[in-house]
Amino acid sequence: MRCSAGFPAPFRSMPSPPVEGVVDAVVRYFAGAKVDFDAVPVDMGRQDAFFAQVYAFVRGLGWGETTTYGAVAKALGAGPEFARDVGQAMASNPVPLIVPCHRVTGAGGKIGGFSAPGGAKLKAHMLALEGIAIEAATGRGRIAFEDEAQAGFDFEPRPP
């Protein structure tokens, strides 16, 4: 039995003008244009209350602006033990470019993970598109912060 049994045959259609606008913006972004996605409406569905706060905060990060998992937790009034929870929210982000989780990094200039296809390599590429220098250090790379105070504005993640 085919998986499509009982469903109508697929067909191509043109996206609605708002969707077409987002697609065009994504293409421009990856071509290196400074694109802002903060006005793109997103229905995140039901979210954990803390995750929803994280997503709202991260949506406010602008082009070329980075922060750390711990700094997000601190900005939301949470303690250092919530840095890992911020990371979990970023890993669960259903729309990684629209909610720009690539702009959230680890402490001490560590690039951190990225749940979108391409992983940390794509995250580094996106940060580079936005003018964030990535040092080719060990393993997953490190970020060279222009303002070294930003690199240190983080909490250590809680032990497992």
Image: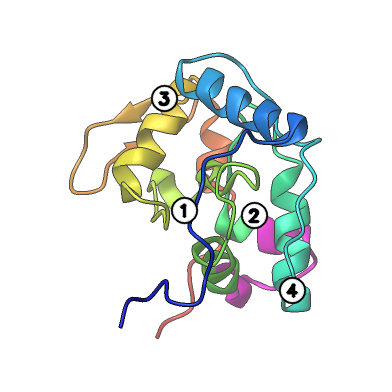
Residue lying at the far left in this picture: please name it.
138
The disc, 4 or 2, on the residue closer to the chain's N-terminal end is 4
- Pick the residue in front: 74 or 61: 61
Give the Cα separation between the discs numbered 4 and 2. 14 Å
Image position, residue 69 (x, y; %): 57, 58
Q: Which residue is mark 2?
A: 71
| Residue denoted by label 1 | 107
Q: Which residue is mark 4?
A: 50
Q: Is residue 93 magenta?
A: no
Q: Tag 3: residue type?
A: Ala
Q: Are marks 3 and 1 in contact (CB under 8 Å)?
A: no
Q: Is residue 114 left or right of residue 11?
A: left
- Identify the residue shown where x is 49% and y is 64%: 91
Going from N to C along the chain, the mark reached first, 4 or 3, is 4
Q: Which residues are magenta?
A: 72-83
Compared across the picture, whether 160 is left or right of 77 comes to left
Q: Distance of mark 1 from mark 2, alpha carbons?
A: 9 Å
Residue with the mark numbered 3: 128
